[in-house]
Amino acid sequence: MVAFCSLKKSWTELLDYVILEHMDDMDEKNKVDEKCPKCGSPLGPITETPTGRKLQRCSTGSWNKETRKSEGCDYVKWFAVEPKTLDEKCPKCGSPLVLQVTRFGKKLKKCSTGGWDKVARKATGCDYVQWINGTTEKLDEKCPLCANPLVLYTTSKGKRMKKCSTSGWDPKARVATGCTYVEWLKPGEYVKVTPGEELLPPEEN
């Protein structure tokens, strides 16, 4: 059993971790057949999402940003994101940590010596794993509902929202707390300005 940093980790995260360890085998198998398994057409070029995940669609399929639906053949092949070595040490054994992304877009830090025995179906090496949650940035804006400051929250999958700084989550009662104001942002809708950088309008979709 993989030892997680917190005792309260969902089965979804455990499933993500196991699937992540099998992605290399899945990619090698898919490299053999470059034809779409659904319609037989050639596969299109490999593209990358804003969150860094790589995918390959059927050449007859595409994604409509306006309707948010697939058009043509809807086959999509996802590729594993190559792990990145971090300038951090494993708190359990002192080895370097690596940053990995699961097929569902979740990010985690794990010991570089950790692995998965496909025959024995169990973890090998150091079993340290830390799942990465979203990040929060302060905004110079007020909540339209309660006038408290707003914050920019970025999920582990790269989605962003403006929400009230007083909002929270009660894990025991499993209910939201504080102000309920939330505004989900579209890609490119919010631009973080640094000193000397010109504020440009969002790109038109």
Image (tube, rainbow, N blue to C red):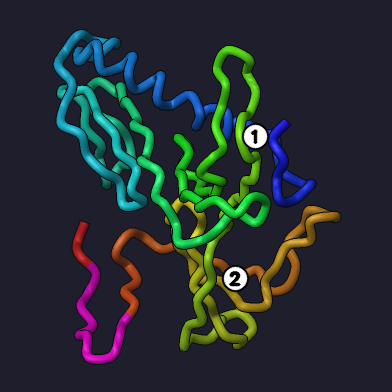
Report the residue at 34% width, 32% height from top: 79
**How far across and down, in percent of the image, does residue 110 sit?**
56, 46
**How far across and down, in percent of the image, does residue 158 sit?**
43, 55
**How far across and down, in percent of the image, does residue 9 sit?**
72, 44
Residue that numbered label 1 is attached to: 14
For marks 2 and 1, give the one nearer the viewer: 1
Q: Residue flagged by tag 1: what amino acid is it?
A: Leu
Residue that numbered label 2 is attached to: 181
Residue 183 visible in image: no
Q: Residues within 10 Å of mark 1 (few under 14, many from 20)?
A: some
Q: Residue flagged by tag 2: what amino acid is it?
A: Tyr
Report the residue at 62% width, 86% height from top: 148
Q: Where is the C terminus found, in terms of image quarters?
A: bottom left
Report the residue at 49% width, 72% height from top: 152
Q: Which residues are magenta?
A: 193-202
> Front-most of 195 and 119?
119
- Farthest right residue? 172
> Front-most of 90 and 57?
90
- Farthest bottom residue? 196
In the rendered view, does 131 fall on the left or right side of 37?
right
Q: Circle 1 sits in a helix, a strand or a loop, which is it?
A: helix
Q: Circle 2 sits in a helix, a strand or a loop, which is it?
A: loop
